Image: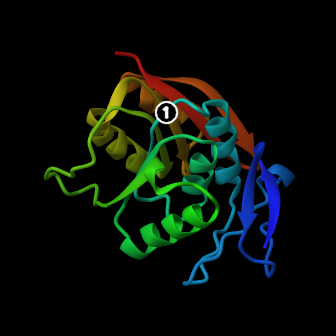
Amino acid sequence: METIRFSNRQLVVLSEKEKIPYEEKYQIRLKSEADFLPQILDSDTACLRLIEEHAGAGKFCLQPDCKDGFLAFCALSFGCGFAALFDDEQFSKTVKYNSELNGIGSHAFSFYPFKLSDKSDTGIGSGYDILIAKGSLERLLEILGFAKKLLCKSAVLILCAEDCSLEELRKALFALGVNIISTAQEGSSFAASAMYSD
């Protein structure tokens, strides 16, 4: 095993076999017993720029559709407390496995089997400082409608809409009382950080 630098933190690299093509400071490799290796998309890069902007803000909440695991790992690597909502138990174990082997203590995060359609008590608590969500505009609006009760009043929303323009996202968010505060562009993908106005 070797050690590489990731956003000014030393992390252990688990595998010599494959490299993720990515900006130098984000070049990490993840391996698990299930040979899980994430695919890094432009949308991930855009989200990461905003995650780094808000690094240290507190507890992160990641919605279930972010199944690549990379954003979850990166949020942890920035030193933030983290709660991830996943409906895929094996995937949850994979991210946990990689995170712990990279020196990130399990006290920093929790995983909960969870489906957004499940309206029962999720047991995930509340007061999260940041929500990271990717998906269609319709999906993002559904997530935001549910997630507000999980977030603190000053929570930052890091959103990546995969099927609309920034202006369309801005208008849809405004109708929900959410205002965009900054954006990041990578290739044809963009991400926006936003906050509830009330």
Give the residue drawn at x 59%, y 40%: 165
Pick the front one: 187 or 87: 87
* Residue farthest to the left, as pictured: 120
Measuring from the top left, give residue 57's x and y in whole percent: 53, 29
- Residue 89 horizontal side relative to residue 105, left or right: left
* Vertical relation: 188 (above or below) 99: above
**Quadrant assignment, res 193:** top right
> Quarter of the image containing the C terminus?
top left
Give the residue drawn at x 37%, y 72%: 89
Specify the color scheme.
rainbow
Q: Which residue is mark 1?
A: 58
Measuring from the top left, give residue 105's x and y in whole percent: 52, 54
Measuring from the top left, give residue 173's x and y in whole percent: 43, 30
> Quarter of the image containing the N terminus?
bottom right
Residue 62, visible in the rendered structure: no
Callout 1 amino acid: Gly
**Quadrant assignment, res 3:** bottom right
Give the residue drawn at x 77%, y 49%: 187
Mark 1 residue element: loop
- Residue 121 horizontal side relative to residue 92, left or right: left
